[in-house]
């Protein structure tokens, strides 16, 4: 059994090593897979803040993934067609700069999370799960029925967006960029978890009444966590859209929400690098099992069922030497 | 011993359908005293405590604390004002260590819930406040123990410690003696006698030995109404109280 | 917009609502009695539809297909209750969500494996084809009218079951205090399996009935499941009355919204923009309704705090 810090380093180290080895062996496809794992890991880290730390079972986090993705899609498509988004009351043009797109993705998904969270957090328990699922679905249907950005067919972006100083079309450079984003997000979330905010959030998760009776405004606390969580997942959406150079309403779907949850569970709920391990395992399963059978989801379902029923701690939990630690 | 009125409950009414749980309850808590609230099961004690703490809205009536009308304030806001509550069934974050639970109290009190950047467990101010509270209740050597591993009595102590981190102006204690053996009850009794000088205590309790040993005043709640308020001797010799409550004890 | 068209849409809304009720009633019963949130309910809906299609195709009889739907759904329901679900009662909601999500994956892919990726077809029965003339000279599909009547009959049946029978009493007692009825000697595990199978049968019935007017395909259940969740949030969990009220409200709002909103927008926008904006807004309407209920009554219209 290993200390969690070492497990985290191992996971991140592996995630970094695989594409480097693939580069040496000239297998760009594997680099792309690793990039996909890194991006999905960011989405999972986002959800884990609300879910693992806060105990907020949001089954509609794909909403923010989609918002981030479409932020990229809309901005980039306007840039590539040289038409502005709007001309009055003020001019907004498209852009293909990743930094700008990321900023817009983060702000937009934070706003949507604020709206959804403000309403959803008025409920708890099962209601909360159902409501978040419903709002995710609402955005899905909206994306399908709004024809301007592809509707059901989605939107293709022909050229990857630009980042200063990098050739983003080069797989290893794009991987490096996504990996760096993942590291930054992990660092920030780790700080958050150890801060008074994180202690209060997890404390409220363990015993809501206790948090209230020490003077903590639990609603505001959770709403803040929810917004930050949505913003991180939104950033992942923008990266994902850039990876595939394609956005579609599927990014909003309940299946996507479910997948993000699956990463977290496979890796270990409330573990910092749980989503990273989980996303990597998921990509591996998709690639390996998917190659064996068209119906690989049956195996995924069986594995998920097994983990939920018998191996609750996930991968990180299984390797770690102690129970989930919070602030210490 | 007349002290300043810290907590003033004025004519609380609360019905659940046809059941009148609180039927015009008025009582107050003065500085330096332990005011015990006793009554048979089903008398409406927990409903009353919930209304005082802020978790339940009365149909009519008001709660005044430190001279302010706090009737519109939430549980969290009243806790901030210095109303500290302990629970009959421990309400603690079971996966946290003793120290972490105490720090949680300090965080709530300081209002720095939205501190994002510095680690909570390395924050001097929070740690000092938490450590002082743990010292006061005698849990310092268990600071790193996981709360779920504490004994029943130790969890009680931790509850009081967390209440202490709130810089309390009054304590609302719900059956702190419940589940404690004779030794534990004695220790806790001594502790509370000392604690009342820091902030007065409104004590809901069934353990009559503790009540008679601790209380400066006693109020008797029966079917949602206070039928008597007075000193230990006055209550002991009150005929109505005997029939309604102590009579049941004798028969038992 | 003619009155006749409006009435027809109202009836369609009722029909949609009544089918949602069958889903929501099962879900709310299962949650009320067992405290379990079941995402696999959509799979049971799908199984009902596939069983009906397969059964009708094999025997040529719609009614036999329906019976196949009810039995298959109930059997599968009982099966997953005995193997998976009963391990989840003591677990937290996250575990229940994940485990039943896993079941969705398994059922969806297994169905695709057995039946292939193309939709199946279920024909409406001959004796219900064509239209019927309603008071006022309105022509309405006989089959859809039958669905409305069946759904309402099931609603009445459920009310009677819950309020008049001993089983219903146990269900209501179970909703109030799960530990207590175990202590009273009622065989909890049998009760739970029965309640789950009942909920499953209702879902399967709904799937089968709808399968004749829409296509029978993998994944048809989940959108309905999510709508049923909206119904429950609006109506209040644990309440059959709430499920019925919520379902009718959702059914009418959605159907009428899709018909009327584009018309409304056409009065001040050009037709193509009106259709676009109108249908986009219509697709979000029931969620907006749900948001409204959340603002004013977070526990639902008939829910308890």
Image: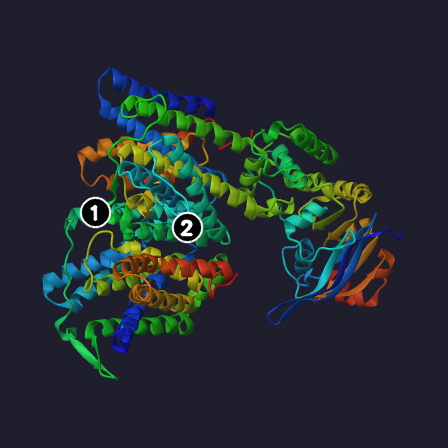
- Are circles 1 and 2 on residues that touch, CB within 8 Å? no
Identity of the residue drawn at 74% across and 48% down: B171
Q: How far apart are the two marked residues, 1 and 2, measured between alpha carbons?
A: 28 Å
Q: Secondary structure at mark 2?
A: helix
Q: Nearer the viewer, residue B81 or C125?
A: B81
Query: Up-down: is B18 above or below B64?
Result: below
Q: Position of residue B229 (x, y in %)?
A: 82, 61
Query: Up-down: is A293 above or below B245?
Result: above
> Quick one: label 2, few (<14), some, or many (20+) residues within 10 Å?
many
Quadrant the C terminus of chain B occupies: bottom right
C291 lies left or right of C23: right
Q: Quadrant of residue C255?
A: bottom left
- Asked if badges 1 and 2 are on one and the same chain, I answer no
Identity of the residue drawn at 41% across and 50% down: A132
- Which residue reaches farthest right? B1
Q: Please name the residue that numbered disc 2 is placed on.
A: A132
The chain carrying label 2 is A
Residue C110 marker: 1
Q: Position of residue C120 (x, y in %)?
A: 15, 56
Q: Nearer the viewer, residue C160 or C237?
A: C237
> Quick one: label 1, few (<14), some, or many (20+) residues within 10 Å?
some
Q: Secondary structure at mark 1?
A: helix
Identity of the residue drawn at 80% across and 68% down: B240
Query: Up-down: is C204 above or below C95?
Result: below
A278 lies left or right of B191: left
Q: Nearer the viewer, residue B166 or A310?
A: B166
The chain carrying label 1 is C
Identity of the residue drawn at 52% across and 44% down: A222
Is residue A278 visible to the viewer in this orientation of the structure? no
Q: Quadrant of residue A11?
A: top left
Q: Position of residue B109 (x, y in %)?
A: 67, 40
């Amino acid at each position: 059994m290993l200390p969690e810090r070492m497990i985290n380093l191992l996971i991140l180290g592996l995630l970094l090593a695989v594409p480097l080895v693939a580069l040496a062996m000239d297998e760009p496809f594997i680099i792309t897979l690793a990039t996909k794992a890194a991006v999905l890991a960011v989405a999972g880290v986002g959800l884990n803040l609300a879910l693992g730390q806060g105990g907020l079972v949001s089954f509609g986090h794909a909403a923010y993934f989609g918002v981030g993705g479409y932020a990229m899609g809309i901005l980039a498509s306007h840039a590539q067609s040289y038409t502005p988004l709007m001309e009055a009351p003020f001019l907004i043009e498209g852009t293909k700069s990743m930094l700008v797109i990321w900023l817009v993705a983060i702000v937009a998904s934070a706003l949507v999370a604020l709206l959804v969270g403000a309403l959803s957090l008025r409920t708890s328990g099962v209601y909360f799960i159902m409501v978040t699922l419903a709002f995710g679905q609402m955005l899905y249907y909206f994306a399908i029925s709004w024809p301007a950005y592809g509707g059901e067919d989605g939107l293709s972006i022909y050229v990857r967006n630009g980042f200063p100083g990098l050739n983003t079309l080069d797989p290893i450079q794009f991987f490096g960029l996504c990996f760096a984003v993942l590291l930054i997000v992990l660092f920030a979330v780790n700080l958050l978890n150890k801060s008074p905010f994180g202690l209060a959030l997890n404390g409220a998760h363990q015993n809501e009444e206790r948090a209230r009776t020490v003077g903590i405004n639990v609603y505001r606390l959770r709403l803040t966590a929810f917004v930050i969580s949505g913003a991180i997942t939104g950033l992942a959406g923008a990266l994902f859209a850039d990876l595939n150079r394609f956005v579609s309403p599927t990014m909003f779907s309940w299946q996507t929400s479910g997948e993000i949850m699956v990463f977290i569970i496979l890796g270990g709920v409330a573990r910092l690098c749980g989503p990273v391990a989980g996303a990597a395992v998921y990509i591996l399963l998709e690639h390996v099992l998917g190659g064996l059978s068209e119906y690989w989801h049956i195996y995924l379902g069986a594995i998920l069922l097994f983990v939920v029923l018998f191996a609750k701690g996930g991968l990180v939990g299984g390797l770690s030497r102690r129970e989930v630690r919070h602030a210490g | 011993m007349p002290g300043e009125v810290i907590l003033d409950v004025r004519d609380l009414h609360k019905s659940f359908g046809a059941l009148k749980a609180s039927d015009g309850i008025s009582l107050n808590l003065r500085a330096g005293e332990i005011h015990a609230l006793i009554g048979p099961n089903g008398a409406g004690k927990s409903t009353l405590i919930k209304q005082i703490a802020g978790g339940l809205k009365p149909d009519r009536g008001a709660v005044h604390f430190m001279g302010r009308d706090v009737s519109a304030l939430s549980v969290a806001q009243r806790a901030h004002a210095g109303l500290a509550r302990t629970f009959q069934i421990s309400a603690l974050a079971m996966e946290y260590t003793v120290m972490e639970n105490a720090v949680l109290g300090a965080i709530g009190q300081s209002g720095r819930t939205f501190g994002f950047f510095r680690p909570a467990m390395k924050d001097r101010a929070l740690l000092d406040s938490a450590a002082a509270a743990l010292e006061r209740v005698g849990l310092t050597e268990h600071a790193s123990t996981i709360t779920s591993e504490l004994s029943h009595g130790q969890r009680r102590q931790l509850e009081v410690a967390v209440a202490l981190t709130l810089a309390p102006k009054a304590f609302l204690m719900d059956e702190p003696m419940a589940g404690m053996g004779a030794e534990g009850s004695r220790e806790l009794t001594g502790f509370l006698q000392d604690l009342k000088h820091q902030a007065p205590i409104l004590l809901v309790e069934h353990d009559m030995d503790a009540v008679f040993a601790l209380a400066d005043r006693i109020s008797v709640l029966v079917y949602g109404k206070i039928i008597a308020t007075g000193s230990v001797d006055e209550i002991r010799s009150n005929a109505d109280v005997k029939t309604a409550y102590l009579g049941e004890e004798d028969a038992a | 917009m003619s009155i006749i068209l409006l009435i027809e849409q109202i009836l369609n809304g009722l029909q949609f609502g009544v089918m949602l009720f069958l889903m929501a009633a099962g879900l709310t019963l299962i949650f009320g009695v067992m405290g379990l949130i079941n995402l696999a309910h959509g799979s049971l809906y799908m199984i009902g539809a596939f069983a009906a299609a397969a059964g009708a195709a094999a025997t040529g009889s719609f009614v036999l297909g329906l019976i196949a739907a009810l039995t298959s759904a109930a059997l599968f329901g009982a099966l997953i209750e005995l193997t998976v679900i009963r391990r989840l009662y003591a677990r937290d909601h996250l575990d229940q969500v994940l485990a039943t999500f896993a079941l969705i994956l398994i059922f969806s892919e297994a169905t695709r494996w057995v039946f292939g990726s193309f939709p199946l077809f279920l024909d409406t029965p001959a004796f219900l084809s064509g239209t019927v003339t309603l008071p006022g000279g309105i022509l309405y599909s006989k089959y859809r009218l039958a669905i409305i009547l069946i759904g309402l009959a099931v609603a009445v049946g459920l009310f009677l079951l819950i309020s008049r029978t001993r089983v219903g009493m146990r269900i209501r007692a179970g909703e109030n205090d799960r530990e207590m009825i175990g202590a009273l000697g009622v065989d909890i595990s049998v009760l739970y399996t029965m309640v789950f199978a009942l909920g499953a049968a209702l879902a399967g019935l709904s799937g089968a009935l709808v399968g004749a007017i829409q296509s029978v395909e993998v994944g048809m259940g989940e959108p309905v499941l999510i709508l049923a969740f909206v119904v429950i949030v609006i109506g209040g969990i644990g309440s059959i009355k709430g499920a019925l009220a919520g379902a009718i409200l959702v059914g009418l709002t959605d159907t009428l919204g899709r018909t009327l909103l584009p018309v409304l927008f056409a009065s001040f926008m050009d037709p193509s923009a009106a259709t676009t904006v109108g249908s986009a807004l219509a697709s979000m309407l029931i969620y907006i309704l749900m948001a409204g209920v959340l603002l004013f009554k977070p526990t639902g219209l008939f829910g308890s705090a």
